[in-house]
Image: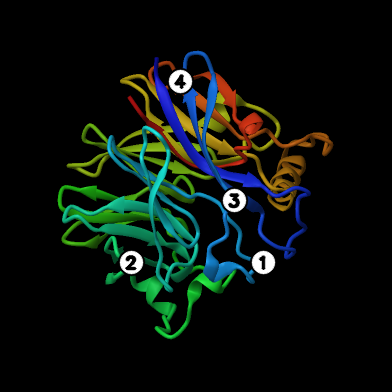
Amino acid sequence: MTKLIVVGGRDRKPKPKPGEGPQHDAGVIISVDVESGEIEPCVLDNTIPQFLHDKTQVGTVYKAATITPDIAYICSTTEIIEYDPETWQPRCRITHPLFNDLHHVLPSHDGHLYVANTGLDRVLKIDNNGELLEVLATGEESLQRTIDADVDYRQIASTKPHFVHPNFVFYVGETLYCTRFNQKDAIAVSGDGGRFNIEEGNVHDGVVHNGKVYFTCTNGRVVCFDLATQQKLLSIDLNQLIQENRPLGWCRSVAVIDDERLAVGFSRLRPTKFKENIDWVTNRLGIDKGVIPKPSRLSIVNMRTLEVEKDICLESADMHAIFSVHRFR
């Protein structure tokens, strides 16, 4: 049995219109059996932290995680939550006033935590008591955003526009990298390192496995690089594999299942994004506008045959936004 853990969020119902509050109202973690497609709920967290009780514009959703055999490190937009991955009981919650739109949490080599802080275009290093240890720039572009130490950024619904939009952090040896959505790359933010130039689209995660790093682009591409040489090894365009006359969804999250297969997450496009995408497809291909967006799902992709072996729909488990997927046991 191949078990995947999927981390993301539940949509609000009814769906809010743009500007009428957050899109999501709960963080969700589920377990998925790749072979059978069976889904088992692990966590549904709709709690509102005390510091957000009167801030109705800030929603609850789980973003990209790091899951180890002993601890599941999960981030919401404003907190880091550590879970026991066997029982899925929470162990602790960590927060800091600079936390705004966190997108990924990663344990550091020296026992602390790194978070991709999208709202401030930075990577933060923090200890398990919530003490801020370091603020790392994500390139010169990120310095356009100044940080006010007297502001509680957790209570600010949006700091857009983002100059970088860092999404994910990962190690290459001792060097820490972050993916940069707007720049379509991943760069070193601590230590000496180079740059992974993804190019194919706006990059989300960078998952390291067996000397390689796999990136997803939100336009439906998966790109793989050799860690040592930073040379591109593989580029898969899932739009070409699936060939539907409608957008595939927001492609975000990847896990290596085995030597041949990947699990790739697609989130159902929200109405405004779907309209933007379908208008583009309609203009280019002349198809009927009356199509509906594809559901949130995992696509099991064979890298050798370049086939999508199966899709596993996750919406029955209230998983509408997928942020990370993890091979677990």
Q: Position of residue 232 (x, y in %)?
A: 30, 39
Read off the residue under disc 2.
Answer: 130
Disc number for residue 46: 3
Instruction: Tell me the quadrant of the picture where the C terminus can be found.
Output: top left
The answer to which of 214 and 85 lies nearer the viewer is: 85
- Residue at left 45%, top 63%? 118
Q: Amino acid at mark 3?
A: Asn
- Residue at left 30%, top 65%? 129
Read off the residue under disc 4.
Answer: 306
Evaluate if marks 2 and 4 touch, with contact meaning CB atoms under 8 Å apart. no
| 1 or 3: tag closer to the N-terminus | 3
Q: CA distance from mark 1 to mark 4?
A: 44 Å
Q: Amino acid at mark 1?
A: Thr
Q: CA distance from mark 1 to mark 2?
A: 24 Å
Instruction: Estimate how packed mark 2 is, as few (under 14), some (14 to 19) or many (20 or more) residues with alpha carbons within 10 Å.
Output: some
| 3 or 2: tag closer to the N-terminus | 3
Of marks 1 and 4, the one in the foreground = 1
| 1 or 2: tag closer to the N-terminus | 1
- Residue at left 31%, top 20%? 259
Instruction: Estimate how packed mark 1 is, as few (under 14), some (14 to 19) or many (20 or more) residues with alpha carbons within 10 Å.
Output: few
